[in-house]
């Protein structure tokens, strides 16, 4: 009995010392008894990889989130809610059309219109007010931004629907799609009821207004470039995209120029079903023009 009492006093002394010195394991774990009368699981007190802080609300969205502007959640977005230290977490949820998500214990919580950080703080507040956790650490991660997307079609490597993860300029989305193909030089941007904008791809490198930041619902179309055709006595016959302001002289050089038997004089032009001769090599080329380079007479 004496030995048991002595060991008990030693244990109590160790607990008191731990409380006084704030040793790990003796700190409050941020858990109170749940509504069902059973104790909840201890919350984690180790530093988190996202912030390295203890006892604070965290919100981590998809990469690039928060760069250049706040991103807010919307219907059909998919999120992952993680309450550190709780074994049944994380919860993978889809925001319903009414803008709400259903969480255990808390019921329906409005998520639409919130930032990931704002939703994390809201969930944390509900847990504290409901008496479920004393100081929970909540993380909200966006796994899919369905409500914030743009549609990209036309002459690109990978057309499709692309999520807007943060404030993305047109150049970033175009690059994600693998870039334009077939020599396309223009992107058509349609936004709501506004007139379509024709944006030169070469202007995207300048940034600023030349590389507009996209908005949810934007429709992008990269048209197939207009073509001209050249054959006859040239080194590289074929079809070629028409560059902005291209002349017949430039078109001739695009075909490699006349070969040893060809001449740049009296080039035959077929346009709209009618034939003529090109008298001015500096005149502009039009879509569908067919150039035939004749053979030299001597």
Image (cartoon, rainbow, N blue to C red):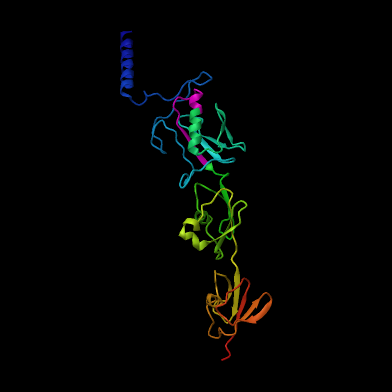
Q: Is residue 251 magenta?
A: no
Location of residue 147 (image quadrant):
top right
Residue 23 image point, x, y percent: 33, 25
Q: Is residue 1 left or right of residue 88?
A: left
Residue at image point 52% right, 77% down: 253
Residue at image point 47% right, 60% down: 205
Q: Which of 179 and 6 is in front in this view?
A: 179
Vertical placement of residue 135 versus 180, above or below? above
Which residue appears farthest toward the front when viewing the image? 194
Vertical placement of residue 70 versus 197, above or below? above
Q: Is residue 127 magenta?
A: yes
Residue 72 image point, x, y percent: 53, 41
Residue 292 image point, x, y percent: 61, 80
Which residue appears farthest toward the bottom when viewing the image? 298
Q: Nearer the viewer, residue 210 or 139?
A: 210
Q: What stretch is highlighted in magenta?
A: 126-142
Residue at image point 54% right, 82% down: 259
Location of residue 99 (image quadrant):
top right
């Amino acid at each position: 009995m004496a030995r048991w009492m002595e060991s008990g006093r030693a244990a109590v002394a160790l607990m008191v010392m731990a409380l006084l010195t704030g040793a790990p394991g003796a700190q409050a774990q941020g858990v109170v008894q749940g509504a069902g009368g059973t104790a909840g699981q201890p919350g984690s007190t180790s530093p988190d990889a996202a912030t390295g802080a203890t006892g604070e609300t965290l919100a981590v969205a998809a990469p690039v989130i928060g760069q250049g502007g706040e991103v807010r959640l919307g219907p059909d977005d998919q999120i992952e809610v993680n309450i550190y230290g709780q074994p049944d977490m994380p919860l993978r949820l889809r925001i319903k059309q009414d803008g709400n998500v259903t969480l255990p214990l808390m019921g329906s919580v409005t998520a639409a219109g919130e930032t990931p950080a704002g939703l994390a703080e809201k969930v944390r507040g509900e847990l504290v007010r409901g008496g479920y956790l004393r100081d929970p650490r909540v993380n909200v991660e966006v796994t899919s931004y369905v409500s914030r997307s743009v549609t990209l079609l036309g002459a690109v490597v990978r057309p499709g629907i692309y999520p807007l993860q943060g404030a993305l300029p047109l150049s970033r989305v175009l690059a994600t799609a693998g870039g334009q193909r077939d020599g396309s030089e223009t992107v058509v941007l349609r936004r709501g009821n506004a007139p379509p904008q024709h944006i030169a791809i070469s202007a995207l490198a300048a940034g600023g207004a030349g590389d507009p930041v996209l908005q949810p619902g934007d429709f992008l179309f990269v048209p197939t470039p207009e073509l001209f055709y050249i054959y006859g006595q040239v080194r590289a016959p074929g079809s070629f995209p028409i560059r902005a302001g291209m002349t017949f002289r430039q078109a001739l050089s695009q075909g490699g120029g006349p070969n040893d038997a060809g001449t740049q004089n009296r080039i035959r032009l077929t346009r709209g079903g009618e034939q003529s001769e090109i008298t001015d090599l500096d005149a502009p080329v039009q879509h569908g023009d067919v150039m035939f380079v004749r053979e030299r007479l001597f």
